[in-house]
Amino acid sequence: MAEEEERLLTIPLGKCWDMPRTKRVPGAIKIIKAFVKRHMRATEENVWIDPRVNEHIWSRGIQKPPRRIKVKVIRFEDELVEVSLPE
């Protein structure tokens, strides 16, 4: 049985720039969850985003999230998926 699966993913966040200025970062979080859900075959309830990823996205404010973000994704045995920044 596989214990855990680890991947490095680059997530494009360009679609959140089509949203209103005050909804771009919350939209980016939704895009990250949907991307990880699709690529790691997980449910949205099992996707956990590290607070450092959230701080990185919020670093330039609500109106200017990054265009893309590189993350490390780990899926554990109990189907929990953790999204964190690569070290």
Image (tube, helix red, strand yellow):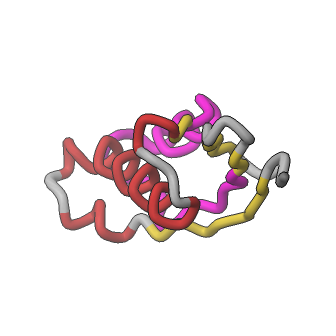
Left or right of 9: which side holds 61? left
Check if residue 53 falls in the magenta segment. Answer: yes
Q: Is residue 66 above or below residue 76?
A: below
Q: Nearer the viewer, residue 73 or 65?
A: 73
Q: Which residues are magenta?
A: 49-73
Q: How many marks?
A: 0
Task: Name the outermost residue toward the left.
Answer: 20
Residue 81: quadrant of the picture: top right
Q: Nearer the viewer, residue 79 or 66?
A: 79
Task: Name the outermost residue toward the front.
Answer: 1
Q: Is residue 35 above or below residue 20?
A: below
Query: Which residue is depicted at the point 41% across and 43% down?
Result: 44
Q: Nearer the viewer, residue 76 or 9?
A: 76
Check if residue 38 falls in the magenta segment. Answer: no
Query: Which residue is depicted at the point 29% across and 49% down?
Result: 27
Image position, residue 67 (x, y; %): 46, 66
Image position, residue 14 (x, y; %): 37, 70
Residue 25: quadrant of the picture: top left
Image position, residue 53 (x, y; %): 59, 41
Q: Is residue 83 above or below residue 41?
A: above
Query: Which residue is depicted at the point 54% across and 66% down?
Result: 39
Query: Which residue is depicted at the point 50% across and 45% down?
Result: 57
